[in-house]
Image (cartoon, rainbow, N blue to C red):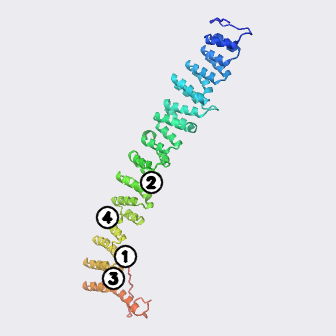
Amino acid sequence: QIYIDRCVPFQIMSNQLNFPQVGDRCFEEGMYDAAKLLYNNVSNFARLASTLVHLGEYQAAVDSARKANSTRTWKEVCFACVAGEEFRLAQICGLHIVIHADELEELISDYQDRGYYEELIALLEAALGLERAHMGMFTELAILYSKFKPQKMREHLELFWSRVNIPKVLRAAEQSHLWAELVFLYDKYEEYDNAVLTMMSHPTDAWKEVQFKDIIAKVANVELYYKSLSFYLDYKPLLTNDLLTILSPRLDHSRAVTYFTKRNQLKLVKPYLRSVQSHNNKGVNEALNNLLTEEEDYQGLRASIDAYGNFDTIVLAQRLEKHELIEFRRIAAYLYKGNNRWRQSVELCKKDKLYKDAMLYAAESKDAELAETLLQWFLEEGRKECFAACLFASYDLLHPNVVLELAWRHNIMDFAMPYFIQVMREYLTKVSPAVNTASTGCVRNGTLPLLLNRTP
């Protein structure tokens, strides 16, 4: 048994002494100076480092830990340096610890328990450039940023998003209400539905136009399309058509029109309606036709009707026939004609004195009674020139005896004479095959030929 004075350092010269055993006994008894000498003598750097931290000789402890090169020793010295607020030395030790993923959590807990967040962040930032840097380091630094330095988190994620544990960082970002960073991570993690929902729930912090339009096109749940339309109408109504351009390929246009109708926003999305009208969707056609009617754009309405016929023509015609503008009532007549409602069509034309349209529709109807009724109406209105034009517009429908009677009763044989000359020419050609069909109908006494035009 060797007794050692606790206060005065000594030198051991005997070769018979068990240095490790005595050193451990001194260490346990708190005789750190003596233990230091003993451990140093046998080059037990791990135990020497433990002894030095008890003596407050942190720099020497770090040097001994470097020689020992043991994770356990590095941890002991690091924690002692943190407790002694020797953060520079603690960082030197910490750089040898963080490269081991299973030791990282304990190191972080020690720093956090003591409240040294800034120093912990500095340690992890310094460790990112190490050759053996691993995912845990990048992940834990991101989590620390989310809690204590949110302004630096976005830059960190943009640089190292592929090296972090995204689900873990997602939870941290959500707990810290870092919505923009949350959307960024959802996008990289291909959770596009959650990214869109987050942007719509927190537009002030998370919504960006270009990013939203890029992500919304990738969502799996099409219902989010309609939620996004509602969001845009409330938050950015003037950008709604830009969004619709992105959504159009997968959008149910009938449902979209119904939604905008309920919101009374059809005028706002008129560009969208025009862009998808090529699909000839009934809902789109009717919505756009109604808009054009409200805007009194009769030329646009006529072009829409001619190009895209998938809509309820009768409903539109009934609506237009009561319109205060004549051009819209004219379109109503045109629509009735397209549905073979010839009498309604002609009656509308007669009401608005659209003589040319009335003659054309009567001729297209192939209804002799309708054409003769129109002839009689022209005479009642005193429109002798229209009577003559109608004779040739409906030439194939009219009965010559009816025309003759009307002309004789109203004393307008001169207006009917070209018609009768044509009729006689056709009858003579059928009766006498010898008649020269190439004849121009000239009268033999030298009069000029009468050229009959059967179009009004």
Q: Earlier in the sequence, mark 3 or mark 2?
A: 2
> Which image quadrant for residue 288?
bottom left
At label 3, which amino acid type do we have?
A: Leu
Question: As displayed, is residue 193 above or below residue 267?
Answer: above
Q: Earlier in the sequence, mark 4 or mark 1?
A: 4
Whether the residues at callouts 4 and 1 have beta carbons within 8 Å, the answer is: no
User: Callout 1: few (<14), some (14-19), or many (20+) C-alpha neighbours within 10 Å?
Assistant: some
| Residue occupied by mark 2 | 251
Q: Nearer the viewer, residue 29 or 282?
A: 29
Q: Nearer the viewer, mark 2 or mark 1?
A: 2
- Tell me the number on the disc at residue 364: 1
Kindly tell me whether residue 385 is visible in this rendering.
no
Q: Secondary structure at mark 4?
A: helix
| Residue occupied by mark 4 | 320
The CA span between labels 2 and 1 is 41 Å
The CA span between labels 4 and 3 is 31 Å
